[in-house]
Amino acid sequence: MILRLLREESGYSLVEVMASIMILAIAILPMVGMFDMGLTSATRGSNYDKARALANKQLEQAQGLSYNTLRLNFPNAPCTFNPPATPNAGLCEATNLQDPDSEFNHLRYTIRKQYVNGSTFANAPTTRV
């Protein structure tokens, strides 16, 4: 009678439970990586939008200034220009700036100003910011 009860007893064995847990773990682990990658992409996109908004804000501010004011006093401090004989004549760079309105206080940026030297632009290095 006991043998009959053992044979008819339904349920899962420990091996079956362990196998199902392993299959589930193998299926779920790549999903965790996808969520992490999605969060990273969303953060990057948000930072890109903030940087673009800050650049537009600075461009609008520069458009409202006269040429001499822009040349000498924009963004915050006067720039010193190289003499015309140097390869980067007419190039001025202000680095590690912060937004004065604190709207974008966690961003640091660089403003490069380049002026016409005769009929051509000065040879400025091209870098991505």
Image (tube, grey):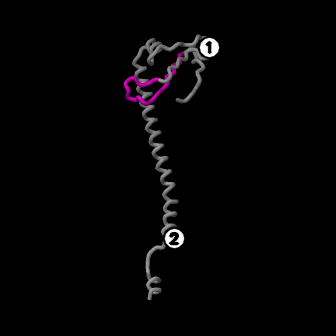
Q: Quadrant of the N terminus?
A: bottom left
* Secondary structure type for disc 2: helix
* Secondary structure type for disc 1: loop
| 94 in relation to 3, above or below | above
Q: Position of residue 89 (x, y in %)?
A: 58, 14
Q: CA distance from mark 2 to mark 1?
A: 78 Å
Main secondary structure type of the part rendered in magenta: loop
Residue corresponding to mark 2:
15
| 127 in relation to 31, above or below | above
Residue corresponding to mark 1:
86
Mark nearest the camera among 2 and 1 is: 2
**Residue that extends furthest to the bottom in the rendered view of this protein:** 1
| 36 in relation to 128, above or below | below
Mark 1 residue type = Thr
Residue located at (46% from left, 50% from top): 35
Q: Which residues are magenta?
A: 97-115
Mark 2 crowdedness (10 Å alpha carbons): few <14, some 14-19, many ≥20: few
Residue 110 colored in magenta in the image:
yes
Residue located at (42% from left, 33% from top): 50
Q: Position of residue 107 (x, y in %)?
A: 45, 30
Q: Position of residue 55 (x, y in %)?
A: 44, 27
Tag 2 and tag 1, C-beta contact below 8 Å: no
Residue located at (44% from left, 84% from top): 5
Mark 2 residue type = Val
Decide which of 88, 25 is in the foreground and name it. 25
The mark that comes first in sequence, 2 or 1, is 2
Residue 58 colored in magenta in the image:
no
